[in-house]
Amino acid sequence: MYDELFGGEKKRKVLVVDDEEINRELLGNMLDDRYDVIFAENGKDAFERIEEYSGMISLILLDLMMPVMDGLEFISKYNEMEIASKLPIIVMTSEVESEADIIKAGAVDFIKKPYNMPEVILARCERVIALFEKQQLIESTEIDELTGLYSKDFFFEYIRQMNESGLVDEINMNVIAIDIEHFHLINEIYGHEKGDIVLKEIATILNDLVKSRIGIAARSDADTFYIYTDGIDDYQKLFEDINIKISNIDKFPSSIRIRMGVNKSIDLNESPETLFEHARIACNLVRGDYMNQIGYYDRKHHDKQIYNAKLVADIDKSIENKDFVVYYQPKYSILNGDPILASAEALVRWNHPELGFISPGDFIPLFENNGLIQKLDKYVWECAASQIRKWKEKYGVAIPVSVNVSRIDIYNPELENVLLDIVKKSDLKPHDLHLEITESAYSDDADRLIEVVNNLRKKDFEIEMDDFGTGYSSLNMLTTIPIDALKMDMSFVRNMHRDSTSLKLVELIIDISKFLDVPVIAEGVEEQSQVDTLKKLGCDIIQGYYFSKPVLPEEFEKYIAG
Protein backbone atom coordinates (compact mmCIF):
# COMPACT_ATOMS: atom_id res chain seq x y z
CA MET A 1 0.00 0.00 0.00
CA TYR A 2 2.82 2.38 0.94
CA ASP A 3 4.63 1.70 -2.32
CA GLU A 4 1.43 2.14 -4.30
CA LEU A 5 0.78 5.53 -2.70
CA PHE A 6 4.23 6.76 -3.65
CA GLY A 7 4.38 5.12 -7.03
CA GLY A 8 7.00 2.66 -5.85
CA GLU A 9 9.66 5.40 -5.70
CA LYS A 10 9.85 5.93 -1.94
CA LYS A 11 11.05 3.07 0.28
CA ARG A 12 10.71 2.60 4.00
CA LYS A 13 13.90 3.33 5.92
CA VAL A 14 15.58 0.63 8.01
CA LEU A 15 18.34 1.51 10.49
CA VAL A 16 21.04 -1.18 10.79
CA VAL A 17 23.13 -0.81 13.97
CA ASP A 18 26.25 -3.06 14.00
CA ASP A 19 29.90 -2.44 14.80
CA GLU A 20 31.13 -4.98 12.21
CA GLU A 21 31.39 -3.47 8.72
CA ILE A 22 31.00 -6.89 7.07
CA ASN A 23 27.68 -7.41 8.87
CA ARG A 24 26.46 -3.98 7.80
CA GLU A 25 27.35 -4.79 4.20
CA LEU A 26 25.64 -8.21 4.32
CA LEU A 27 22.42 -6.77 5.73
CA GLY A 28 22.61 -3.82 3.37
CA ASN A 29 22.80 -6.13 0.35
CA MET A 30 19.89 -8.24 1.64
CA LEU A 31 17.63 -5.28 2.30
CA ASP A 32 18.66 -2.79 -0.36
CA ASP A 33 16.18 -3.87 -3.04
CA ARG A 34 13.18 -3.39 -0.75
CA TYR A 35 14.31 -0.80 1.82
CA ASP A 36 16.33 2.38 2.09
CA VAL A 37 19.07 1.24 4.49
CA ILE A 38 20.96 3.61 6.80
CA PHE A 39 23.75 2.55 9.16
CA ALA A 40 25.14 3.16 12.63
CA GLU A 41 28.20 1.56 14.26
CA ASN A 42 26.95 1.51 17.87
CA GLY A 43 24.11 2.59 20.15
CA LYS A 44 25.37 6.15 20.55
CA ASP A 45 25.70 6.52 16.79
CA ALA A 46 22.18 5.04 16.40
CA PHE A 47 20.64 7.82 18.49
CA GLU A 48 22.22 10.37 16.17
CA ARG A 49 20.75 8.60 13.12
CA ILE A 50 17.30 8.48 14.77
CA GLU A 51 17.45 12.22 15.43
CA GLU A 52 18.72 12.92 11.92
CA TYR A 53 15.94 10.87 10.31
CA SER A 54 13.25 11.74 12.84
CA GLY A 55 9.88 10.29 11.90
CA MET A 56 11.26 8.59 8.79
CA ILE A 57 12.59 5.26 10.12
CA SER A 58 10.31 2.20 10.10
CA LEU A 59 12.53 -0.42 11.79
CA ILE A 60 15.78 -0.82 13.76
CA LEU A 61 17.99 -3.89 13.29
CA LEU A 62 20.20 -3.84 16.39
CA ASP A 63 23.33 -5.84 17.14
CA LEU A 64 23.52 -7.01 20.76
CA MET A 65 27.29 -6.86 21.34
CA MET A 66 28.87 -3.48 20.42
CA PRO A 67 31.45 -1.10 21.87
CA VAL A 68 30.60 2.38 23.27
CA MET A 69 26.93 1.40 23.81
CA ASP A 70 25.69 -2.16 23.38
CA GLY A 71 22.23 -3.27 22.28
CA LEU A 72 20.61 -3.79 25.68
CA GLU A 73 21.88 -0.41 26.94
CA PHE A 74 20.54 1.22 23.78
CA ILE A 75 17.10 -0.36 24.28
CA SER A 76 17.04 0.73 27.92
CA LYS A 77 17.85 4.36 27.09
CA TYR A 78 15.51 4.34 24.10
CA ASN A 79 12.62 3.16 26.28
CA GLU A 80 13.21 6.12 28.61
CA MET A 81 12.83 8.64 25.80
CA GLU A 82 9.64 10.73 25.51
CA ILE A 83 8.54 9.54 22.08
CA ALA A 84 4.91 9.33 21.00
CA SER A 85 5.42 6.12 19.02
CA LYS A 86 8.47 3.89 19.63
CA LEU A 87 10.12 2.19 16.67
CA PRO A 88 10.11 -1.62 16.56
CA ILE A 89 13.50 -3.19 17.27
CA ILE A 90 14.78 -6.55 16.01
CA VAL A 91 17.94 -7.67 17.83
CA MET A 92 20.65 -9.48 15.88
CA THR A 93 22.70 -11.93 17.96
CA SER A 94 24.46 -15.28 17.99
CA GLU A 95 23.61 -15.68 21.69
CA VAL A 96 20.35 -17.61 21.49
CA GLU A 97 20.28 -17.95 25.28
CA SER A 98 19.77 -14.16 25.49
CA GLU A 99 16.38 -14.38 23.73
CA ALA A 100 14.34 -13.95 26.94
CA ASP A 101 16.38 -10.93 28.06
CA ILE A 102 16.03 -9.40 24.60
CA ILE A 103 12.22 -9.69 24.56
CA LYS A 104 11.91 -8.51 28.18
CA ALA A 105 14.02 -5.47 27.34
CA GLY A 106 11.52 -4.41 24.68
CA ALA A 107 12.66 -5.87 21.36
CA VAL A 108 9.89 -7.32 19.22
CA ASP A 109 11.96 -10.09 17.61
CA PHE A 110 15.50 -11.35 17.10
CA ILE A 111 17.56 -12.66 14.17
CA LYS A 112 20.26 -15.28 14.64
CA LYS A 113 23.71 -14.76 13.32
CA PRO A 114 25.21 -15.65 10.89
CA TYR A 115 22.92 -14.17 8.24
CA ASN A 116 22.55 -17.23 6.00
CA MET A 117 18.78 -17.04 5.30
CA PRO A 118 18.05 -13.74 3.53
CA GLU A 119 14.40 -14.65 2.78
CA VAL A 120 13.70 -15.22 6.51
CA ILE A 121 15.27 -11.88 7.45
CA LEU A 122 13.22 -10.07 4.81
CA ALA A 123 10.02 -11.82 5.91
CA ARG A 124 10.60 -10.88 9.56
CA CYS A 125 11.33 -7.26 8.67
CA GLU A 126 8.23 -7.05 6.51
CA ARG A 127 6.01 -8.61 9.19
CA VAL A 128 7.29 -6.36 11.99
CA ILE A 129 6.98 -3.19 9.90
CA ALA A 130 3.43 -4.14 8.86
CA LEU A 131 2.41 -4.75 12.49
CA PHE A 132 4.05 -1.51 13.59
CA GLU A 133 2.27 0.54 10.92
CA LYS A 134 -1.03 -1.11 11.74
CA GLN A 135 -0.55 -0.25 15.41
CA GLN A 136 0.30 3.34 14.47
CA LEU A 137 -2.93 3.55 12.47
CA ILE A 138 -4.91 2.18 15.40
CA GLU A 139 -3.29 4.61 17.83
CA SER A 140 -3.97 7.53 15.50
CA THR A 141 -7.71 6.78 15.56
CA GLU A 142 -7.88 5.55 19.15
CA ILE A 143 -6.92 8.84 20.74
CA ASP A 144 -8.43 12.24 20.09
CA GLU A 145 -5.42 14.20 18.90
CA LEU A 146 -6.40 17.48 20.55
CA THR A 147 -7.44 16.32 24.03
CA GLY A 148 -5.61 13.01 24.47
CA LEU A 149 -8.85 11.32 25.50
CA TYR A 150 -10.24 8.29 23.72
CA SER A 151 -11.99 8.90 20.44
CA LYS A 152 -15.69 8.14 20.42
CA ASP A 153 -15.48 4.90 18.43
CA PHE A 154 -12.73 3.39 20.60
CA PHE A 155 -14.46 4.63 23.74
CA PHE A 156 -17.55 2.64 22.77
CA GLU A 157 -15.47 -0.39 21.86
CA TYR A 158 -13.68 -0.40 25.21
CA ILE A 159 -17.00 -0.11 27.03
CA ARG A 160 -18.23 -3.11 25.08
CA GLN A 161 -15.16 -5.06 26.18
CA MET A 162 -15.60 -3.97 29.80
CA ASN A 163 -19.26 -5.01 29.80
CA GLU A 164 -18.68 -8.32 28.02
CA SER A 165 -15.79 -9.26 30.33
CA GLY A 166 -18.05 -9.05 33.37
CA LEU A 167 -15.77 -6.44 34.93
CA VAL A 168 -18.67 -4.10 35.73
CA ASP A 169 -21.43 -6.63 36.42
CA GLU A 170 -21.54 -5.88 40.14
CA ILE A 171 -20.57 -2.22 39.86
CA ASN A 172 -22.88 0.78 39.65
CA MET A 173 -21.53 2.48 36.53
CA ASN A 174 -22.37 6.06 35.58
CA VAL A 175 -23.17 7.20 32.04
CA ILE A 176 -22.56 10.95 31.76
CA ALA A 177 -22.42 13.44 28.90
CA ILE A 178 -20.96 16.93 29.34
CA ASP A 179 -21.43 19.75 26.88
CA ILE A 180 -20.15 23.34 26.80
CA GLU A 181 -22.86 25.97 26.41
CA HIS A 182 -22.40 28.14 23.29
CA PHE A 183 -18.90 26.84 22.65
CA HIS A 184 -18.91 28.36 19.17
CA LEU A 185 -18.93 31.81 20.79
CA ILE A 186 -15.61 31.04 22.51
CA ASN A 187 -14.05 30.36 19.13
CA GLU A 188 -15.60 33.47 17.62
CA ILE A 189 -14.78 35.83 20.50
CA TYR A 190 -11.48 34.43 21.81
CA GLY A 191 -10.23 32.51 18.76
CA HIS A 192 -9.86 28.81 18.03
CA GLU A 193 -6.59 28.60 19.95
CA LYS A 194 -8.37 29.65 23.14
CA GLY A 195 -11.19 27.23 22.32
CA ASP A 196 -8.66 24.40 22.01
CA ILE A 197 -7.21 25.32 25.41
CA VAL A 198 -10.68 25.08 26.92
CA LEU A 199 -11.23 21.61 25.44
CA LYS A 200 -7.82 20.35 26.55
CA GLU A 201 -8.25 21.64 30.09
CA ILE A 202 -11.67 20.03 30.44
CA ALA A 203 -10.19 16.79 29.07
CA THR A 204 -7.49 16.94 31.76
CA ILE A 205 -10.12 17.41 34.46
CA LEU A 206 -12.14 14.42 33.21
CA ASN A 207 -9.07 12.26 32.75
CA ASP A 208 -8.02 12.97 36.34
CA LEU A 209 -11.55 12.11 37.45
CA VAL A 210 -11.53 8.59 35.98
CA LYS A 211 -7.85 7.86 36.62
CA SER A 212 -8.48 6.58 40.15
CA ARG A 213 -11.70 4.79 39.24
CA ILE A 214 -12.89 1.98 37.01
CA GLY A 215 -13.71 4.23 34.12
CA ILE A 216 -12.74 6.00 30.93
CA ALA A 217 -13.46 9.35 29.31
CA ALA A 218 -13.77 10.43 25.70
CA ARG A 219 -14.30 13.44 23.55
CA SER A 220 -17.35 12.59 21.51
CA ASP A 221 -17.25 15.45 19.05
CA ALA A 222 -16.66 19.20 19.05
CA ASP A 223 -17.45 20.30 22.62
CA THR A 224 -19.11 17.14 23.95
CA PHE A 225 -17.44 14.73 26.38
CA TYR A 226 -18.47 11.30 27.66
CA ILE A 227 -17.64 9.64 30.98
CA TYR A 228 -18.20 5.98 31.88
CA THR A 229 -17.13 5.42 35.45
CA ASP A 230 -17.99 4.07 38.87
CA GLY A 231 -17.97 5.80 42.24
CA ILE A 232 -20.26 8.77 41.61
CA ASP A 233 -23.20 9.07 43.97
CA ASP A 234 -23.72 12.85 43.99
CA TYR A 235 -24.04 14.28 40.48
CA GLN A 236 -24.54 17.81 41.77
CA LYS A 237 -21.24 17.64 43.67
CA LEU A 238 -19.49 16.25 40.59
CA PHE A 239 -20.91 19.10 38.51
CA GLU A 240 -19.81 21.69 41.07
CA ASP A 241 -16.33 20.16 41.37
CA ILE A 242 -15.85 20.31 37.60
CA ASN A 243 -17.08 23.90 37.54
CA ILE A 244 -14.67 24.90 40.32
CA LYS A 245 -11.75 23.38 38.44
CA ILE A 246 -12.83 25.13 35.26
CA SER A 247 -12.98 28.48 37.07
CA ASN A 248 -9.41 27.93 38.31
CA ILE A 249 -7.98 27.34 34.86
CA ASP A 250 -5.56 30.10 33.95
CA LYS A 251 -6.85 32.46 31.23
CA PHE A 252 -10.15 30.58 31.06
CA PRO A 253 -13.07 32.75 29.84
CA SER A 254 -15.30 33.45 32.82
CA SER A 255 -18.42 33.13 30.70
CA ILE A 256 -17.95 29.40 30.11
CA ARG A 257 -20.84 27.26 31.33
CA ILE A 258 -21.23 23.52 31.05
CA ARG A 259 -24.28 21.32 31.26
CA MET A 260 -24.43 17.67 32.19
CA GLY A 261 -26.67 14.80 31.12
CA VAL A 262 -26.96 11.65 33.21
CA ASN A 263 -28.48 8.39 31.98
CA LYS A 264 -29.97 6.84 35.11
CA SER A 265 -31.60 4.04 33.13
CA ILE A 266 -28.60 1.79 32.45
CA ASP A 267 -29.20 -1.54 30.78
CA LEU A 268 -25.93 -3.27 29.92
CA ASN A 269 -27.77 -5.19 27.20
CA GLU A 270 -28.09 -1.89 25.32
CA SER A 271 -25.23 -0.76 23.13
CA PRO A 272 -22.81 1.86 24.48
CA GLU A 273 -23.93 4.12 21.65
CA THR A 274 -27.53 3.94 22.91
CA LEU A 275 -26.54 4.48 26.55
CA PHE A 276 -24.69 7.67 25.72
CA GLU A 277 -27.24 8.89 23.21
CA HIS A 278 -29.70 8.86 26.11
CA ALA A 279 -27.22 10.78 28.27
CA ARG A 280 -26.88 13.31 25.48
CA ILE A 281 -30.64 13.65 25.24
CA ALA A 282 -30.69 14.38 28.97
CA CYS A 283 -27.94 16.94 28.48
CA ASN A 284 -29.97 18.70 25.80
CA LEU A 285 -33.02 18.80 28.06
CA VAL A 286 -31.33 21.59 30.04
CA ARG A 287 -29.89 23.47 27.07
CA GLY A 288 -30.22 27.18 27.81
CA ASP A 289 -31.76 26.49 31.23
CA TYR A 290 -29.98 28.76 33.71
CA MET A 291 -31.77 27.26 36.70
CA ASN A 292 -31.01 23.59 35.99
CA GLN A 293 -27.76 22.47 34.43
CA ILE A 294 -28.07 18.74 35.00
CA GLY A 295 -30.56 16.71 33.00
CA TYR A 296 -31.59 13.15 33.85
CA TYR A 297 -32.68 10.38 31.53
CA ASP A 298 -34.51 7.78 33.58
CA ARG A 299 -36.71 4.78 32.90
CA LYS A 300 -39.81 6.96 32.75
CA HIS A 301 -38.18 9.15 30.13
CA HIS A 302 -36.98 6.06 28.28
CA ASP A 303 -40.44 4.49 28.29
CA LYS A 304 -41.94 7.77 27.07
CA GLN A 305 -39.46 7.88 24.21
CA ILE A 306 -40.29 4.32 23.19
CA TYR A 307 -44.01 5.11 23.49
CA ASN A 308 -43.65 8.21 21.32
CA ALA A 309 -41.64 6.28 18.75
CA LYS A 310 -44.46 3.74 18.60
CA LEU A 311 -47.02 6.48 18.01
CA VAL A 312 -44.94 8.05 15.26
CA ALA A 313 -44.42 4.69 13.57
CA ASP A 314 -48.14 3.87 13.65
CA ILE A 315 -49.72 7.13 12.47
CA ASP A 316 -49.91 6.21 8.77
CA LYS A 317 -51.37 2.77 9.42
CA SER A 318 -53.88 4.17 11.90
CA ILE A 319 -55.02 6.83 9.45
CA GLU A 320 -55.43 4.14 6.79
CA ASN A 321 -57.38 1.87 9.16
CA LYS A 322 -59.44 4.76 10.57
CA ASP A 323 -58.19 4.13 14.11
CA PHE A 324 -58.39 7.88 14.53
CA VAL A 325 -62.03 8.62 15.33
CA VAL A 326 -63.54 12.07 14.97
CA TYR A 327 -65.98 13.14 17.70
CA TYR A 328 -68.24 16.16 17.54
CA GLN A 329 -69.14 18.57 20.33
CA PRO A 330 -72.16 20.84 19.75
CA LYS A 331 -72.06 24.63 20.01
CA TYR A 332 -75.26 26.43 20.99
CA SER A 333 -76.38 29.99 20.34
CA ILE A 334 -77.84 31.40 23.59
CA LEU A 335 -78.60 35.04 22.82
CA ASN A 336 -82.18 34.78 21.64
CA GLY A 337 -84.42 32.65 23.83
CA ASP A 338 -83.78 28.95 24.12
CA PRO A 339 -80.39 27.58 23.08
CA ILE A 340 -80.23 26.69 19.39
CA LEU A 341 -77.68 24.34 17.79
CA ALA A 342 -75.36 26.58 15.81
CA SER A 343 -72.42 24.40 14.85
CA ALA A 344 -69.97 21.76 16.12
CA GLU A 345 -66.30 21.24 16.76
CA ALA A 346 -64.45 18.21 15.41
CA LEU A 347 -62.20 16.58 18.03
CA VAL A 348 -60.00 13.62 17.17
CA ARG A 349 -59.44 10.60 19.40
CA TRP A 350 -57.08 7.67 18.80
CA ASN A 351 -58.34 4.15 19.42
CA HIS A 352 -55.03 2.38 18.93
CA PRO A 353 -55.38 -1.35 18.09
CA GLU A 354 -52.63 -2.31 20.57
CA LEU A 355 -52.39 0.56 23.05
CA GLY A 356 -56.09 1.26 23.37
CA PHE A 357 -57.44 4.76 23.85
CA ILE A 358 -54.72 7.42 23.59
CA SER A 359 -55.25 10.89 24.97
CA PRO A 360 -54.95 13.75 22.47
CA GLY A 361 -52.59 15.31 25.02
CA ASP A 362 -50.14 12.51 24.19
CA PHE A 363 -50.19 12.53 20.42
CA ILE A 364 -51.19 16.07 19.36
CA PRO A 365 -48.10 17.84 20.81
CA LEU A 366 -45.89 15.00 19.57
CA PHE A 367 -47.16 15.30 16.01
CA GLU A 368 -46.96 19.09 16.14
CA ASN A 369 -43.30 18.88 17.09
CA ASN A 370 -42.33 16.50 14.29
CA GLY A 371 -44.62 17.87 11.58
CA LEU A 372 -46.84 14.78 11.31
CA ILE A 373 -49.80 16.84 12.50
CA GLN A 374 -50.35 17.87 8.87
CA LYS A 375 -51.31 14.30 7.99
CA LEU A 376 -53.68 14.00 10.92
CA ASP A 377 -55.26 17.42 10.35
CA LYS A 378 -55.97 16.58 6.71
CA TYR A 379 -57.60 13.32 7.80
CA VAL A 380 -59.81 15.18 10.31
CA TRP A 381 -60.75 17.82 7.73
CA GLU A 382 -61.83 15.09 5.30
CA CYS A 383 -63.84 13.27 7.98
CA ALA A 384 -65.56 16.49 9.09
CA ALA A 385 -66.42 17.55 5.54
CA SER A 386 -67.78 14.09 4.75
CA GLN A 387 -69.89 14.15 7.93
CA ILE A 388 -71.31 17.61 7.17
CA ARG A 389 -72.38 16.24 3.80
CA LYS A 390 -74.04 13.17 5.32
CA TRP A 391 -76.02 15.29 7.80
CA LYS A 392 -77.02 17.68 5.03
CA GLU A 393 -78.38 14.83 2.93
CA LYS A 394 -80.21 13.31 5.90
CA TYR A 395 -81.57 16.45 7.58
CA GLY A 396 -81.56 18.99 4.77
CA VAL A 397 -79.34 21.41 6.69
CA ALA A 398 -75.58 21.97 6.74
CA ILE A 399 -74.21 22.02 10.28
CA PRO A 400 -70.94 23.98 10.18
CA VAL A 401 -68.04 22.15 11.82
CA SER A 402 -64.91 23.80 13.22
CA VAL A 403 -61.61 22.03 12.57
CA ASN A 404 -58.17 22.81 13.90
CA VAL A 405 -55.53 24.32 11.63
CA SER A 406 -52.17 23.75 13.28
CA ARG A 407 -49.41 26.32 13.24
CA ILE A 408 -47.50 23.72 11.18
CA ASP A 409 -50.26 23.72 8.56
CA ILE A 410 -49.80 27.47 8.11
CA TYR A 411 -46.42 26.82 6.48
CA ASN A 412 -47.88 24.44 3.90
CA PRO A 413 -47.89 26.36 0.59
CA GLU A 414 -50.69 24.08 -0.64
CA LEU A 415 -52.96 24.63 2.40
CA GLU A 416 -55.55 26.68 0.53
CA ASN A 417 -55.76 24.19 -2.34
CA VAL A 418 -55.98 21.22 0.03
CA LEU A 419 -58.92 22.76 1.92
CA LEU A 420 -60.71 23.81 -1.25
CA ASP A 421 -60.29 20.32 -2.69
CA ILE A 422 -61.75 18.75 0.46
CA VAL A 423 -64.92 20.89 0.51
CA LYS A 424 -65.33 20.44 -3.24
CA LYS A 425 -65.23 16.64 -2.97
CA SER A 426 -68.00 16.74 -0.35
CA ASP A 427 -70.02 19.24 -2.42
CA LEU A 428 -69.87 21.86 0.35
CA LYS A 429 -69.29 25.58 0.52
CA PRO A 430 -66.07 26.80 2.17
CA HIS A 431 -68.04 28.54 4.93
CA ASP A 432 -69.39 25.13 6.02
CA LEU A 433 -65.91 24.29 7.33
CA HIS A 434 -64.82 26.71 10.04
CA LEU A 435 -61.07 26.93 10.60
CA GLU A 436 -59.66 27.34 14.10
CA ILE A 437 -56.25 28.92 14.44
CA THR A 438 -54.36 29.67 17.65
CA GLU A 439 -52.40 32.66 18.85
CA SER A 440 -49.21 30.58 18.87
CA ALA A 441 -49.25 30.61 15.06
CA TYR A 442 -49.22 34.41 15.18
CA SER A 443 -46.29 34.38 17.59
CA ASP A 444 -44.34 32.02 15.32
CA ASP A 445 -44.71 34.00 12.11
CA ALA A 446 -47.24 36.84 12.11
CA ASP A 447 -46.68 37.84 8.47
CA ARG A 448 -47.22 34.31 7.20
CA LEU A 449 -50.37 33.84 9.29
CA ILE A 450 -51.86 37.15 8.12
CA GLU A 451 -51.23 36.20 4.49
CA VAL A 452 -52.78 32.74 4.90
CA VAL A 453 -55.85 34.00 6.80
CA ASN A 454 -56.53 36.73 4.26
CA ASN A 455 -56.32 34.25 1.38
CA LEU A 456 -58.61 31.74 3.11
CA ARG A 457 -61.22 34.37 3.95
CA LYS A 458 -61.19 35.52 0.33
CA LYS A 459 -62.19 31.96 -0.55
CA ASP A 460 -65.11 32.22 1.92
CA PHE A 461 -63.65 30.14 4.76
CA GLU A 462 -64.58 31.37 8.24
CA ILE A 463 -61.74 31.83 10.70
CA GLU A 464 -62.13 31.33 14.45
CA MET A 465 -59.41 32.54 16.83
CA ASP A 466 -59.01 29.65 19.29
CA ASP A 467 -57.89 29.95 22.95
CA PHE A 468 -58.13 33.73 22.77
CA GLY A 469 -56.62 35.50 25.75
CA THR A 470 -53.89 33.00 26.60
CA GLY A 471 -51.18 34.32 24.27
CA TYR A 472 -48.88 37.31 24.46
CA SER A 473 -50.10 39.25 21.47
CA SER A 474 -53.88 39.01 21.51
CA LEU A 475 -54.77 42.68 21.15
CA ASN A 476 -52.03 43.47 18.65
CA MET A 477 -53.03 40.41 16.65
CA LEU A 478 -56.64 41.56 16.38
CA THR A 479 -55.55 44.76 14.70
CA THR A 480 -53.86 42.86 11.87
CA ILE A 481 -55.77 39.61 11.36
CA PRO A 482 -59.38 39.64 10.15
CA ILE A 483 -61.38 36.91 11.92
CA ASP A 484 -64.98 35.71 12.02
CA ALA A 485 -65.23 34.60 15.66
CA LEU A 486 -63.34 34.77 18.97
CA LYS A 487 -63.14 31.58 21.00
CA MET A 488 -62.57 32.36 24.66
CA ASP A 489 -60.16 30.06 26.47
CA MET A 490 -61.99 27.72 28.84
CA SER A 491 -59.80 28.68 31.81
CA PHE A 492 -61.57 32.06 32.02
CA VAL A 493 -65.00 30.43 32.06
CA ARG A 494 -64.03 27.90 34.73
CA ASN A 495 -62.62 30.57 37.03
CA MET A 496 -65.03 33.44 36.46
CA HIS A 497 -67.08 32.58 39.58
CA ARG A 498 -63.95 31.92 41.64
CA ASP A 499 -62.12 35.22 41.22
CA SER A 500 -63.05 38.68 40.04
CA THR A 501 -60.08 38.94 37.67
CA SER A 502 -61.28 36.06 35.49
CA LEU A 503 -64.79 37.50 35.43
CA LYS A 504 -63.44 40.90 34.34
CA LEU A 505 -61.42 39.22 31.59
CA VAL A 506 -64.54 37.42 30.36
CA GLU A 507 -66.35 40.77 30.23
CA LEU A 508 -63.40 42.32 28.41
CA ILE A 509 -63.23 39.58 25.78
CA ILE A 510 -66.96 39.85 25.13
CA ASP A 511 -66.63 43.64 24.80
CA ILE A 512 -63.77 43.17 22.33
CA SER A 513 -65.88 40.82 20.24
CA LYS A 514 -68.71 43.35 20.17
CA PHE A 515 -66.29 46.08 19.14
CA LEU A 516 -65.02 43.85 16.32
CA ASP A 517 -68.59 42.86 15.49
CA VAL A 518 -67.83 39.14 15.62
CA PRO A 519 -69.43 36.46 17.79
CA VAL A 520 -67.66 35.18 20.88
CA ILE A 521 -67.64 31.46 21.69
CA ALA A 522 -67.18 30.30 25.28
CA GLU A 523 -65.88 26.75 25.68
CA GLY A 524 -65.64 24.64 28.79
CA VAL A 525 -69.10 25.59 30.05
CA GLU A 526 -70.32 23.00 32.57
CA GLU A 527 -72.79 24.67 34.95
CA GLN A 528 -76.09 26.54 34.73
CA SER A 529 -74.60 29.49 36.63
CA GLN A 530 -71.93 29.85 33.96
CA VAL A 531 -74.58 29.81 31.23
CA ASP A 532 -76.60 32.48 33.03
CA THR A 533 -73.59 34.76 33.55
CA LEU A 534 -72.37 34.40 29.97
CA LYS A 535 -75.83 35.07 28.57
CA LYS A 536 -76.17 38.16 30.78
CA LEU A 537 -72.79 39.45 29.60
CA GLY A 538 -73.76 38.99 25.95
CA CYS A 539 -71.85 35.88 24.98
CA ASP A 540 -73.08 34.54 21.64
CA ILE A 541 -72.23 30.83 21.56
CA ILE A 542 -71.55 28.24 24.25
CA GLN A 543 -69.71 24.92 24.04
CA GLY A 544 -69.09 22.45 26.84
CA TYR A 545 -70.28 19.54 28.94
CA TYR A 546 -73.32 21.54 30.04
CA PHE A 547 -74.82 20.59 26.69
CA SER A 548 -72.74 17.58 25.69
CA LYS A 549 -69.35 15.97 25.79
CA PRO A 550 -67.75 15.21 22.40
CA VAL A 551 -69.77 12.36 20.87
CA LEU A 552 -69.72 10.07 17.84
CA PRO A 553 -71.60 11.28 14.73
CA GLU A 554 -74.54 8.91 15.33
CA GLU A 555 -75.11 10.27 18.83
CA PHE A 556 -74.67 13.86 17.66
CA GLU A 557 -77.67 13.46 15.38
CA LYS A 558 -80.09 13.73 18.32
CA TYR A 559 -79.02 17.38 18.68
CA ILE A 560 -79.74 17.99 14.99
CA ALA A 561 -83.13 16.30 15.18
CA GLY A 562 -83.95 18.37 18.28
Image (cartoon, rainbow, N blue to C red):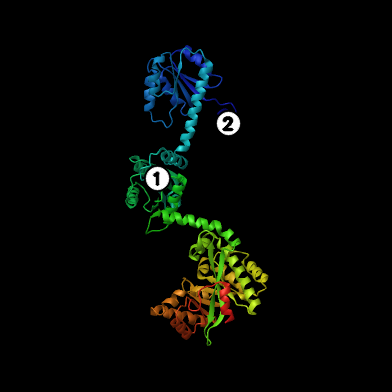
- Asked whether 94 or 195 is in front, the reply is 94
Mark 2 closeness class: few <14, some 14–19, many ≥20 residues within 10 Å = few
Secondary structure state at the residue bearing disc 2: helix
Relative horizontal placement of residue 458, taking residue 301 as reference (left or right): right
- Asked whether 381 or 513 is in front, the reply is 381
Q: Position of residue 20 (x, y in %)?
A: 45, 12
Q: Residue at x 45, y 55 (%)?
A: 303
The quarter in which the C terminus is drawn is bottom right
Q: Position of residue 34 (x, y in %)?
A: 55, 21
In the rendered structure, find residue 5 and report the number of the disc placed on it: 2
Q: Which residue is mark 1?
A: 227
Please tell me whether residue 515 is drawn above or below residue 370 in the rendered image: below
Q: Residue at x 44, y 23 (%)?
A: 108
Q: Position of residue 214 (x, y in %)?
A: 36, 40
Mark 1 closeness class: few <14, some 14–19, many ≥20 residues within 10 Å = many
* Quarter occupied by residue 100: top left
* Quarter occupied by residue 420: bottom right
| Sequence-first tag of 1 and 2 | 2
The three-letter code of the residue at mark 1 reads Ile
Q: Residue at x 56, y 75 (%)?
A: 556
